[in-house]
Amino acid sequence: MDHRILPLPVETRRLVLRPASAQDALIVQAAVEESFESLHPWMPWAAQPQSLEETQAFLAGAETRFRSGEEFAVSGFLREGGTFVLSTGLHPRNWAVPRFEIGYWCRTSMQGRGYVTEAVLALTRLAFVDMQAVRIEIRCDARNLDSRREAERAGYRLEATLRCDDRANDGSLRDTAVYAILRQEYRGLD
């Protein structure tokens, strides 16, 4: 399996995107606690509050997976002031294609300012240009309208709704909306 490493850090107009790090556990934990109510319905890892130790362990594991090319967890910080804004990631799903998936969450106090779209556009470009992606997907609970709008703002198209595809944190069955963009549809390859 030929995997490459996502070339980070990268700066966007307002953000610095860099690999997730266990050194950021305190600030990520504070953002998760601030945002737990809005994360809980949608994120499997937010089924219950997590401890600082759990956050540190997750981030340490993310560093290891990043270095091995298994997963690319990314933290986004404001260029001005360095405030932690969001967590995102580029997740290899099939290196033979190559096909990736992008996931994201934004801390509650920073929502509604376009930061997620900015980060998704940057990761999309990195995936197509540097990782030679052919296909990138964004998947979310079909009821998560905010996440769906983010995918659409970044130019992804709804391809399918997988009915009764997974369980929500409350135990109910949920549908999964699958958005995608293909290399030949992407306009940023000048």
Image (cartoon, grey):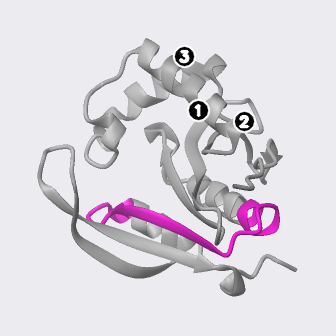
Q: CA distance from mark 2 to mark 1?
A: 9 Å
Sequence-wise, the earlier of marks 3 and 1 is 3
Give the residues in magenta: 125-146
Whether residue 159 sits left or right of residue 161 in the image: it is right
Which residue lies at the image location 65% right of the left edge and 68% below the top edge?
96
- Which residue is under mark 1? 62
Q: Is residue 89 visible?
A: yes
Under mark 2, the amino acid is Arg
Which residue lies at the image location 57% right of the left edge and 54% below the top edge?
116
Sequence-wise, the earlier of marks 2 and 3 is 3
Tell which tag, 3 or 1, sits nearer the viewer. 1
Residue 78 vertical position relative to residue 166 in the rendered view, above or below:
above
Under mark 3, the amino acid is Leu
Q: Position of residue 162 (x, y in %)?
A: 28, 73
Q: Characterize the local packing of mark 2: few (<14), some (14-19) or many (20 or more) Cα atoms within 10 angstroms.
A: some
Tell which tag, 2 or 3, sits nearer the viewer. 2
Whether residue 105 sits left or right of residue 168 in the image: it is right
Under mark 1, the amino acid is Ala
- Which residue is under mark 3? 26
Tell which tag, 2 or 1, sits nearer the viewer. 2
What is the quadrant of the N terminus in the image? bottom right
Whether residue 28 sits left or right of residue 122 in the image: it is left
Label 3 SS: helix
Label 1 SS: helix
Q: Quadrant of residue 24?
A: top right
Which residue lies at the image location 59% right of the left edge and 32% below the top edge?
62
* Number of the label disc, if any, that sits on residue 67: 2
